[in-house]
Image: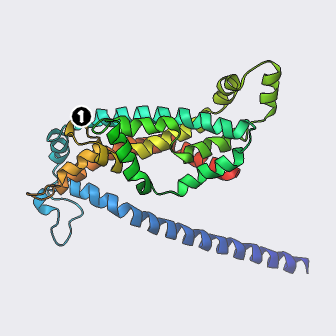
């Protein structure tokens, strides 16, 4: 009797293991299929970047170019002032990221650690601005910057970041600040520290991971931003790389697809490196914004 029970139990355990393996196999199959679909645009970009112009739209499509034209990459960055555009992009991304992180951290500190009338209402209004499409405020901000004489300068791309314009980063940092024990603030106040000293010497040193998350996420967004540079920059010497890529679209002689795709590959390299070296911060950013509402 005992042997039969043990045998039945062993059979059930084996059935459960088989079922789990089938489920896991199906999940992997779905994930691999989805990954292949997502990878197709990048594969087409890479394939086109290595083709001659006449072979780009050859039928049937040729995924592996023959011959492989490696010179497309050098030609793409030498026929346009990519070096200058790259430096422009680094300047805009660096300064605007610094301004955004500093201003967002100060505003988030006020919402998370200070007690003042109307705080919750103002925070809800701030969150509501995240639902507002950027295109809604496009014309008023353009008129404002035009009246200030800021057109064809980097100021419209940099200055708004110093005023905590993006509510998402305020929200992200506020969520992190809420997890820091308030006893630290009380102890500091007993020792005579002001609000600014608490922010500077207690909150900021403990918030380096959250600040890194905000900086990486905003820099990634700013690196590939196209709409604002298109509106505010007219002189080609002031272009960022994302705007410079548009110069491969010719109005008379057609689009140089192979050179454009080669330039795109080069343009993506910094973002790919950032993702591989900082992917844990991206995951932490999702966790922070979802832990505490």
- In the picture, measured across the screen, residue 200 lies left or right of residue 148, that is right
- Residue at image location 22% in from the left, 38% down from the top: 82
Q: Quadrant of residue 84?
A: top left
List the residue tagged with mark 1: 83
User: Please, what secondary structure does the residue beneath circle 1 have?
Assistant: helix
Q: Position of residue 216 (x, y in %)?
A: 49, 40
Seen from the viewer's position, the closer of residues 68 and 104 is 104
Residue positioned most to the left: 253
- Residue at image location 41% in from the left, 43% down from the top: 222
Q: Position of residue 120 (x, y in %)?
A: 71, 48
Seen from the viewer's position, the closer of residues 148 and 181 is 148
Q: Quadrant of residue 233?
A: top left
- In the picture, measured across the screen, residue 61 lies left or right of residue 209, that is left
Residue 265 appears in the rendering: no
Q: Quadrant of residue 255?
A: bottom left
Structural crowding at the residue carrying mark 1, measured as other residues with C-alpha within 10 Å and reported as few (<14), some (14–19) or many (≥20):
few
Seen from the viewer's position, the closer of residues 166 and 117 is 117
Q: Position of residue 67 (x, y in %)?
A: 14, 56
Seen from the viewer's position, the closer of residues 236 and 42 is 236
Image quadrant containing the N terminus: bottom right
18 to 150, vertically: above or below? below
């Amino acid at each position: 009797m005992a042997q039969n029970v043990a045998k039945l139990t062993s059979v059930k355990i084996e059935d459960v293991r088989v079922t789990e393996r089938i489920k896991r196999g199906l999940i992997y199959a779905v994930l691999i299929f989805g990954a292949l679909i997502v990878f197709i645009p990048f594969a087409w970009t890479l394939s086109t970047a290595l083709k001659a112009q006449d072979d780009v739209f050859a039928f049937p499509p040729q995924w592996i170019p023959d011959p492989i034209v490696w010179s497309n990459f050098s030609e793409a960055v030498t026929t346009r002032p990519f070096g200058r555009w790259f430096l422009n992009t680094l300047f805009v991304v660096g300064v605007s990221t610094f301004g955004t992180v500093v201003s967002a951290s100060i505003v988030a500190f006020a919402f998370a650690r200070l007690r003042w009338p109307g705080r919750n209402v103002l925070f809800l209004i701030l969150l509501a601005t995240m639902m507002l499409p950027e295109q809604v405020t496009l014309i008023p901000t353009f008129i404002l910057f035009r009246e200030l004489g800021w057109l064809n300068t980097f100021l419209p791309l940099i200055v708004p970041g110093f005023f905590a314009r993006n509510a998402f980063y305020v929200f992200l940092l506020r969520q992190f600040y809420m997890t820091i024990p308030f006893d630290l603030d009380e102890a500091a106040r007993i020792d005579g520290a002001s609000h600014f000293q608490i922010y500077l010497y207690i909150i900021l040193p403990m918030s380096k991971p959250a600040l890194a998350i905000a900086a990486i996420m905003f820099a990634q967004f700013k690196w590939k931003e196209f709409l604002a540079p298109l509106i505010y920059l007219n002189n080609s010497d002031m272009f960022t790389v994302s705007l410079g890529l548009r110069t491969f679209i010719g109005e008379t002689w057609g689009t140089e697809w192979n050179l454009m795709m080669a330039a795109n590959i080069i343009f993506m390299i910094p973002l790919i490196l950032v993702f591989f070296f900082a992917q844990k911060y991206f995951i932490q950013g999702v966790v922070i914004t979802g832990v505490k509402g």
